[in-house]
Image: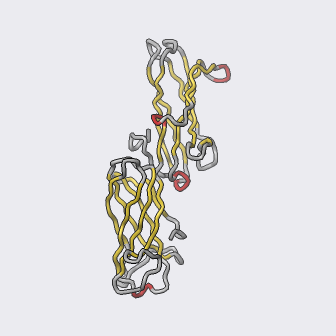
Amino acid sequence: LDSTSLSHYSACESRVVLTDTVSYTNLQAGGSYTVSGYLYDKTSGTDALDANGSRITASASFKAASGGSGTVTVKYSFKADPEALAGKTYTAFETISKGSGSGSTPVIVHNDPDDTSQQVYFPGITTVLTDSSSGEHLVNAAKSVTVTDTVSYVNLEPGAVYTLKGSLYDAATGSKAVDDNGSYISAETTFTASSSGSGTASVTYSFDAETLGGAVLTAYADVILDGRTVSFERDSEET
């Protein structure tokens, strides 16, 4: 689970903390064991890597509960490239070994990439900005302009209500675009994620644009849940 949301839905952040609760049965009561694991990137079919290109691993030592059944928690804490996380699904693979170190013996191995109880989802979005009337990317620099940013999303929590916030930027300078009144051009809306966690949402910008003739504008977007930005788009080349 994501340690902030306490759910299987995480966020594209530079520091990620995940908690895996491992249930075990038929161990030797009071015996010393080690649970070790790593994160598998189900999206790419390879081991998940942190921001430094290293495998993401974790381990914990424990004594089996009386009766030989119980739970043990493993925490994965790692630095990440937020943009690289977008749209990913990570699965935790775990091994419980008797003893510790080089003399330990594996007794339980759980490496199922399709086990949804072991998965964490990182949201991803892409955006398309068009004239609200024509649906084209070319917009007249008129007194009153309305453009729509259509945001496609994946890996959102089904049924959760998100806030979609956006701002228009000048693609040439990388600075926030301003309208004829010198104000930044921004907009926001709320939407409910689809039952599959994938779909589209849109946000509309209305502004005076007579002074923007010849400019190329691009939309930056943030998807927010409970005050936490879970995914974002910052590509100045995105149209």
The N terminus, quarter of image: top left
Task: Name the residue at the right extreme.
Answer: 102
Q: At which x and y percent is residue 198?
A: 43, 52
Q: How many marks?
A: 0
Toward the front, the furthest residue is 134
Nearest to the observer: residue 221 or residue 30? 221
As rendered, which of 73 and 202 lies closer to the eye? 202
Give the percent coordinates (x, y) of residue 48.
59, 43
Q: Residue at x 47, y 80 (%)?
A: 138
Q: Depth check: 129 or 86 in front?
A: 129
* Residue drawn 53% across the image and 51% down it: 85
Q: Is residue 200 above or below residue 6?
A: below
Q: How is the image coloured?
A: secondary structure
Picture coordinates of residue 91, whole percent (x, y): 53, 38
Residue at 45%, 30% in the rendered image = 21
Res 111 quadrant in image: top right
Which of the 4 image quarters holds residue 94? top right
Q: Is residue 239 above or below residue 93?
A: below
The x and y percentages for residue 80 are 55, 49
